[in-house]
Structure formats: C-alpha cells, structure tokens
Image (tube, rainbow, N blue to C red):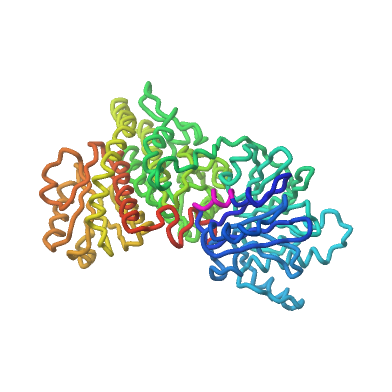
Amino acid sequence: MCGIVAYLGDKEAQPLLLEGLRRLEYRGYDSSGLAVLNGKGLEVVKKVGRIEQLERALGPHPLHGSLGICHTRWATHGKATEVNAHPHIDASGKLAIVHNGVIENYGVLKKKLIDKGYQFRTETDTEVLAFLIGFYFDTLDAEVGNRLEMSVMEALREVTGTYGLVAIHQDQPDVMVGARRGSPLVLGIGPHEHFLASDVAAIAAHTQTVAHLRDFDVVTIDRSGYRLKSLSHNESGLEISQIDYQAADAQMGDFPHYMIKEIFEQTLSIQNAVRGRLNVEESTAQLGGLNLSPQDLRDIDRIVITGCGTAMHAGMVGEYIIESLAHVPVEVEWASEFRLRNSPLDRRTLVLVVSQSGETEDTLGALREAHRKGHRVLGICNNVASTLARETDGGVYMYAGPEISVASTKAFTSPVIIFVLLGLLLGRMRFLSATQGRQIIEAIEALPDQITQVLKQSAHINAIAEKYSYSRSMLFFGRQMQYGIALEGALKMKEITYIHAEGHPTAELKHGVIALVDENTPSVFLCPSDGAYEKNINNLQQIKARRGPVIAVATEGNEEIAQQADDVIYIPDAPEYTAPILSVVALQLFAYHMAVILGRDVDKPRNLAKSVTVP
C-alpha cells in the first residue's frame, strides 16, 4: 500500500509533507516524490529509493508554498524508476496527482487519449489518469469556479478500478481535490489548514479531527474549508470524528527497530484485546460488538474464517481453538480464493474476515462476496475506521495499537486470543461447564506474564540465531494448533531475512518434505507438552537420523527434549489453546534476531508492503 499526504494551509507545505511521508514508510515503497504550488507554478521533485534520497535532492533547493502533495510508490504498473514515481503531471504540466490503487481500464483510456494526440512519458496507469483529468480541465470553460473538481469527477466516471487520489492545478492555486474508491483516504481538519492522507498516522501529530472518505466520495478543499460530493449520488455528508492516535505511539522509543518494539508490546496488546471481555461471574466471554443475540449464536452451525497472509495463519490457529472449545465446525479459506470460488454455504454459516488494516483488497472482496450471497459477516480488525469495519455486520476490534513494522506481530497474536474468547463464548452456550470456563479465563489472564517469560529469553534466542545464520533454507513443523504457528514462523523468517523457509504439518514429513533434510537445513519443531508430543518426538528423531539440525520449542521443565534437539527454546506451561501465542512470540524473536545478524532492513523488507490494497 503506497502512501499519500497532501496539505493546504498557512504553513510551508514541504516540511509537513516529508514528515507525513516518513510516518508512512512502514507501508512499503520503492520511490517517492512531491509537488508544491509556489504561487508561480508547479514544482515537482521525484527520486527512486528511500525518502532520504528525496530529502537530499530537496536540501539545496526547498520547494516553497502552502499547497502540496506527496507520495511513496510501490511499483505495480511500470518499473521503479524516477519517471514512473509520483506525482504525475498532465500534458500541460500544470496538473499533478498522486494515486493509490489500480486503474483497470487504463489501456482503453490511454488509447482514447493517444487518438486525441496525447503522448505519454511513463508506463503507469496513474499518468493516464492525470492526462484524463487534464483533458477535461482544458475542455471546461475557464470561468467555471469548480473546474478542478468537475474535471476529477468527469474523469473518474470513466474509470474502472480502485483509487485514492489527490489532484492540484496551478490555475487553481488554492484548491485540492481528493477522491476515494477502494483505497483509503482520510481528511484531516485543523485550524486554518486541511490534510488528505492515506493513513491517520501521517497527520496525527497535527490534528485529531478527521473524516474518512467513503467509496465514490469526492472532497474539494480550499482556503475557506471543504465540501463533499459523491459519484454515487448519495451525498450524506462526512462523519467527523476525534481519533485516539498519539504520534508518540508510533515512535520506536529506546528500541532499534519497530518490529522488536512491537514484539515486546504483545504483553500489553493481549491485555487490550481481552480487557472488558471476560465475564468471571458467568465464566464466559462477552463480545458485544458481534451484534448477534444469544439465539443467533446458538444457531451457528458452521464458521468460515478468511484472510490473507498472517491473518490467514491466525485463522488456521483459530479453527482448532474454536472447534476444540465450542465444537462448531470451522473452515479456513484464503480470501483471494474465497472471493472467486462458488463455495456452498448454508444459511447458518457465519463468515469471519480477519485483517489488521481492514483495507486488504482480497479480504474486502471475500467480505462482499459473502454479503452478496446473504451471509452474516463479522470482522476481526485493528483499524476502527477501516472499510472492513464499516462494511461488516459486527465484529471484534483487536486494540493492538499502531503496528508500523511491515512484518506483523501484534496483529497475529491479538486475533488468536480473540478466537479463544469466541471459542469460550460459543462453548459456554453449548457444553462447557462453568468450571471449564473459569479455567480458560485463568489461562487467558496468565498470558501477559507468560509472554514476558518468553521475552526474557531474547538473548538466548539471539545466540541460537547466530549459530544458524549460515542457513539458506529452514523447515518449520507443527501439529494441530501449532501447525498455523509453523506457517507463521516460516513466513516471518522469509519476510525479513530472505531465507527460504517452509512450514509443514509434522506428520507430512515423510510425504516428500524429508527429501529437503540435510546437515545444512535446520528444522524448527514446535513440540509443547500436549497430546501430540510423542508423535512430534518421533518425527524429530527422523530428522536427527538424517543429520538435520533441530531447534525445538518446548514446554519448560521438559529435560528430555534437550537430549533430542540441538537447541531448545522453552515456553511456559500453558493449555493447548494459549500455547500457540507463546510459541509464535519465540519464533518472532528468532526471525528478528536472524534478520539483524544478516544486516537486513527489518522494518521495511524488500518488495513488501504493510497492507495489500491492490490485487
């Protein structure tokens, strides 16, 4: 997901724009640029690479003006080059736009403009959109007051695809126009100034008063304020809200990277996820945001969980948790597949969509497909103002706080504990006794201290990472609730270290995976003291018999495992439904330390973005 920041006010725009871009670096990008109207004309500067490159280019020649737009680009159409970077200008050189999303019919629009004599300079779909808006601007009468607004709306009526965009034009030097369809855009409202941004993180230091644009909204901002129109002819006004987002929450503090900070914040994020949701008196959970009556909950015969990447892995853990605690059949589907397949769902099926950002394109597509077929859809999300939060019938917020590192940590453990709460709630409605419910609550309440015990092993885990830093490939194995942890551990390793890593069900070892075992390929075995422990040990020994190094994640007090594995990371004794959270914290630390040892860019790994908002 690329980053947009735009400013119109009474201050110099460039410092505010660059500050906002730095706060959006976590989203992933390969180039950046900005455009400022300086009273004489439009100035544009673009650079490939990190924002530091852009700042160096601007250093000797800062752009002066109080209206400007900027962007961090993650290449989709066209390579990561300076000419393809945003902002893009139109044929006249007077109009500039920044754009997130994909213009699906840009080929058709480009041909139309070429037939009119236009010549393009880049490979991007965004330049086509800039030219199209510029074409309409040039055909409108110069006396029309809202010329830029009308031009944007006319162009977008021809567009198929997604966009979050902001446009400015030197002939209207006190106006900027923003529009949204399928890609987030938020309006920030301050005294004598307004912002547009793709994330509140970019503007939270300057205003806490915001309005999130809805699909098809078009907002026009000038020196006197803003006005809203809609391409869907449903102009109901913007909902103004006060955000609870402090810029300091997104600072690293004393930590060297955001990722390690967020790993350590999981003691608090787990507490936030369960705060006010445990009913000790009735030995159950209370999740009021579900918007379901007790009878509705009892009527659920099947649950489908869908998400992408880390959210999908959390769902795979949740499948085992809910089935174990509530005896409700659960299936987990990749959102990208669910949105396209004709999956048979009966009327008593509940669909759960999981997304940290609430803006993941495939997950939103799955949500809408489920709604199209008449099913109730609930969300598990960390962004209370997201598209997912607005479009679901109800749900549970993670309350994990800002997650800046591209590699997700808090936003994995938070939905897992929410699945425990959901399993407890549904289980108490079916067959769990009050005594069993109290035991589950006690296990949940013990988690923060148990996570702290795992975090205290950071130096030990760092030493293990140092030992295996030679690795070019790693295997991760787990069973039952730990299988999703094996997948997530492998994902973290490949995301931030670029080491090839695979997660597998332990029992699948002999079904092909064992061919990968050799003395240079470490295997990470998730083998807490649960019902599958003996089977895990059997498979572990098969790895050792083939000279494969083994790192075990095991329950503290288990001395036997030290005789079997080359290295051991111990986690506190916990029930099967909370142990996965402890296991994954250990694997997050393992991947983090490995990445640091290898000199990787931990928070901004190559080719990755925080949220995938384009297909």
Residue in view at x 19 percent, y 47 percent:
568
Viewer-proximal residue among 388 and 541: 541
Percent coordinates x, y for residue 395 in the rendering: 50, 39
- Asked if residue 532 lies left or right of residue 365, the reply is left
Which region of the structure is painted magenta? Answer: 19-26
Q: Tell me if I can see residue 240 in this picture.
A: yes
> Residue 203 is drawn in which quadrant?
top right
Relative placement, left or right, of 155 versus 373 is: right
Please name the predominant secondary structure of the magenta segment in the image. Answer: helix
Task: Please give left or right for residue 280 compared with residue 41 in the image.
Answer: left
- Residue placed furthest toward the top: 281
Give the camera-side residue of 81 and 548: 81
Q: How far across and how far down the image is residue 603, in percent?
A: 43, 52
**Image point 29% across, 41% down: which residue?**
582
Residue positioned most to the front? 60
Q: Nearer the viewer, residue 71 or 178?
A: 71
**Magenta span includes 402:** no
Q: Which residue shows up at 78% across the image and 57% down it? A: 148
Q: Does the magenta stretch include residue 24?
A: yes
Q: Quadrant of the rendered structure where residue 280 is?
A: top left
The residue located at (27%, 36%) in the rendering is: 453
How many marks the image carries: the answer is 0
